[in-house]
Amino acid sequence: MHTEQSEQAQPEKFNLVASVPFVLVHLLCGLAFVTGVHWQWVLLAVATYVVRMFGVTAGYHRYFSHRAFSTNRVFQFALAFLAQLSAQKGVLWWAAHHRHHHRSSDQADDIHSPVQRGFWYSHVGWILSTRWEATNQSAIRDFARYPELRWLDRWWLVPPLTGGVLLFALGGLPWLVWGGFISTVALWHGTFVINSVTHVFGTRRYLTRDTSRNSLVLALITLGEGWHNNHHFHQNTANQGWFWWEIDLTFYALKVLSLFGVVRDLRLPSEQTKLAFTRYTAEQRAQLQQESRFGMYQPKPPVPTPEGTPMLSGFTPVMIKR
Ligand SMILES: [Zn+2]
Ligand SMILES: [Zn+2]
């Protein structure tokens, strides 16, 4: 259970014991010197990276954190399982923490803000700290009501361990090293750059109170999550690349799945949202240009609503049926 006291009791800096498995998986990549390299194993590593990155982006992020589309209960579980194959803890833990990131983006209590706690803390430090281990249940009540998701969240190591055993059974040590360890380490850092690099490197099109940016390179690495400034401007869309040139492989895959009825009600941004930047004043455009420079800058403090919660940017989403 998540309590303010349990969080306060834990130190914020990374925990040495808790970091052992994370460091160990990095070291086990060195077994590649034992197995050697074969193009088929490299292909396997790429394939297990791409499939699981889809689980992270479509599952952990767009579905469980943002409810950017709908699906049935069976595929919902499959998405959660696929996401957890990435070994990034339970689906409820992931989504609850991510919702917190949007509620307080780059403000003092944002857990993984490079401007608040430093680049490396936003990248891996917060994950290796025991302080953020608990899940704020009230932030994820909508999905915590499903017993199968609660089970998977609790036993979050079941999918990655199953994956590891399967790889070893099918292809021995080379498959485990390339499809398991190397692919997983790449996948971890490929995901973590969204918390660290996308708030430091890239350009800004929309005025948001955080330091989010857009980057094609990061969009390619993360199957579409590099359009992070779009995403912070309006969170709940199934696509994060909003223009035809903004490559978003996760969204293309979701579109294909929607043709087969596996997912439905993909939320898309309205034209008004997408073109909001065309209505900016010269002063606002100059500000965005300034903020698009490489490096960190101090974000604007949030404007409290009458209820006292920080106001989120963006507009009402438009539901588009397939
Ligand atoms: Zn962000
Ligand atoms: Zn998000």
Image: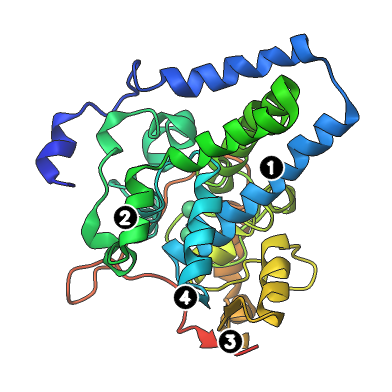
Q: Give the CA distance from mark 2 to mark 4.
A: 31 Å
Nearest the viewer among 133 and 302 is: 133
Q: Which residue is mark 4?
A: 314
Q: Earlier in the sequence, mark 4 or mark 1?
A: 1
Q: What residue did someone put label 2 on?
A: 150
Marks 1 and 3: CB-CB under 8 Å?
no
Query: Callout 3: 10 Å neighbours few (<14), some, many (20+)?
Result: few
**Depth-wise, is mark 2 or mark 3 nearer the camera?**
2
Asked if residue 235 shows in the view, the reply is no
Q: CA distance from mark 2 to mark 1?
A: 25 Å
Q: On the image, numbered disc 3 is attached to which residue?
A: 272
Q: Residue furthest front?
A: 169
Position of residue 56 in the picture relative to residue 10 (left or right): right
- Quarter placement of the C terminus: bottom right
Dot 3 amino acid type: Gln
Residue occupying the far top of the picture: 34
Residue at left offset 68%, top offset 73%: 257
Percent position of residue 56, x then y? 56, 52
Compared across the picture, whether 143 is left or right of 67 comes to left
